[in-house]
Image (tube, rainbow, N blue to C red):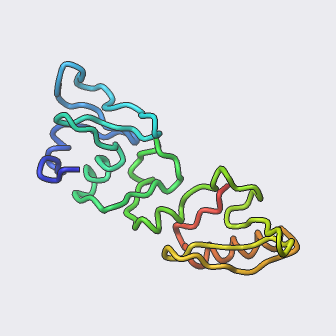
């Protein structure tokens, strides 16, 4: 995002914010009309809005609209890309944002941070902490493995902990 072009003042001139969406306050071009919801959902699942010939993600615009600055990363607290209500957006590091990610579609255990280890024939518990892989043991009982990973995720990821469900 080009901060020389976009700033809080400009966004307040262009848009009105209501319930997680920006609405045009001006007729910026032939495709926009005053009062219309700005932008559209793209293939990647994010809502994008065109301003001065450049597409911007709505959550970044909404954060800038409210707080007047842009962090490097903005986290959707509930993990829903299209939920751009300001109460659902928070500044985050990339690492914190990854902590809040949902369970990977390739996961086979159904528990984020738990996988079956064929060699030990036990459930392996692991977690990324500040970008580093950390293992928390191997367990015969998947329920014990789930308890361990949930506890460690809460301890190390804090408010950004996402248990994948």
User: The C terminus appears in which quarter of the rendering?
Assistant: bottom right
* Horizontal side of residue 164 vs 123, given as left or right: left
Task: Say which residue appears at 42% left-offset and 65% top-offset.
Answer: 94
Q: Residue 137 is drawn in which quadrant?
A: bottom right
Residue furthest out toward the top: 30
Task: Say which residue appears at 75% left-offset and 55% top-offset.
Answer: 108
* Horizontal side of residue 12 vs 99, given as left or right: left
Q: Position of residue 117 (x, y in %)?
A: 79, 69
Say which of 88 and 6 sits in front. 6
Residue furthest out toward the front: 119
Q: Is residue 87 above or below residue 119?
A: above
Say which of 164 and 53 sits in front. 53
Task: Say which residue appears at 49% left-offset and 57% top-offset.
Answer: 77
Q: How many marks?
A: 0
Task: Say which residue appears at 40% left-offset and 65% top-offset.
Answer: 92
* Horizontal side of residue 75 vs 121, given as left or right: left
Q: Position of residue 152 (x, y in %)?
A: 65, 77
Residue furthest out toward the left: 4
* Horizontal side of residue 118 vs 160, given as left or right: right
Q: Position of residue 149 (x, y in %)?
A: 70, 72
Q: Is residue 51 above or below residue 4?
A: above
Q: Position of residue 84 (x, y in %)?
A: 41, 45
């Amino acid at each position: 995002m080009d901060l020389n072009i976009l700033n809080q003042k400009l966004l307040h001139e262009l848009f009105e914010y209501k319930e997680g969406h920006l609405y045009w306050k001006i007729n910026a071009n032939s495709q926009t009309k005053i009062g219309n919801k700005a932008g559209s959902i793209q293939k990647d699942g994010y809502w994008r809005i065109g301003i001065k010939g450049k597409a911007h993600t709505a959550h970044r615009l909404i954060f800038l609209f409210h707080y007047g600055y842009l962090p490097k990363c903005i986290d959707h607290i509930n993990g829903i890309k299209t939920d751009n209500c300001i109460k659902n957006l928070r500044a985050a590091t990339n690492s914190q944002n990854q902590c809040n990610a949902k369970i990977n579609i390739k996961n086979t255990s159904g528990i984020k941070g738990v996988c079956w280890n064929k060699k030990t024939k036990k459930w392996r518990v692991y977690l990324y902490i500040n970008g580093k892989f950390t293992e928390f043991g191997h367990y015969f009982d998947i329920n014990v493995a789930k308890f361990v990973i949930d506890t460690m995720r809460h301890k190390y990821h804090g408010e950004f902990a996402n248990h994948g469900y």
